[in-house]
Amino acid sequence: MESLLRTLTEQVQALSIAEVVAVVTAVLYLLLAIRRNIWCWFFAGISTAIYVVLFIGARLYMESILNIFYFAMAIYGWYFWYTGSGATPPIIRWPVRRHAIAIVTVVVLSVLFGYLLERHTDAVFPYIDSLTTFAAIWATFLVARKVLENWWYWLLIDSVSIAIYWARDLTLTALLFAVYVAMIPFGLLAWKRAMREQSISKT
């Protein structure tokens, strides 16, 4: 335990200002997303732009590409929440069949890209990196469209990501994702409550 605390202290002292800013803005994104506040996408844009560079340095190339996608989705999310279905698009659910097709697609793409990364790059954790990347692309799209099930995807993605980031010495980011995992149940409950309120208001 004492060795773990010493290691953690050393890693925290070595943190870059860029990672600190990325983590703080990422936390603000999630807090505002839980409250369904459109400004969540502004902070998502800042955080993801920084992480593009950080993940290249950590040789997590798929994660870097993922954050380019996140940045684009921040723009899309802002646009959709502002213009789609009025200023506040309703929370919806999608059928199991649609999720099943998406999961199969994510797994196939992850195996393919994981193989290519393993053969042609110096990427670490190529298959897991690819899996979390493609799953996160899908989950981010669900957030932008306000699909309730996004929270279940994030629970799995963020749990796996903790181990990846810790292993690559992105300590603060690993802790950020631990906070994410702890906050996900609150997000799920908040969105479910808002969905019930939507149904009541329609009656």
Image (spheres, rainbow, N blue to C red):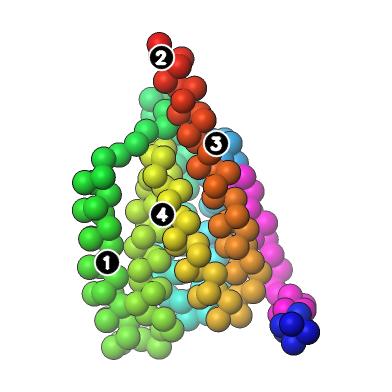
| Quadrant of image for the N terminus | bottom right
What residue sits 69% from the left and 73% below the top?
Answer: 16
Q: CA distance from mark 4 to mark 3?
A: 16 Å
Residue type at numbered disc 1: Val
Secondary element type, mark 1? helix
Secondary element type, mark 3? helix
Q: CA distance from mark 2 to mark 1?
A: 38 Å
What residue sits 53% from the left and 39% below the top?
Answer: 189
- Can the viewer see residue 134? yes
Q: Which mark is residue 153?
A: 4
Q: Residues within 10 Å of mark 4 (few under 14, many from 20)?
A: some
Question: Residue 203: x, y in percent?
Answer: 40, 11
Residue type at numbered disc 2: Lys
Name the front one of labels 1 and 3: 3
Q: Is 150 situated above or below 136?
A: above
Question: Residue 161: x, y in percent?
Answer: 50, 68
Secondary element type, mark 2? helix
According to the picture, the residue beneath numbered tag 2 turns out to be 202
Q: CA distance from mark 2 to mark 4?
A: 29 Å
What segment is highlighted magenta in the picture?
Answer: 8-31
Q: Which mark is residue 190?
A: 3
- Can the viewer see residue 73? no
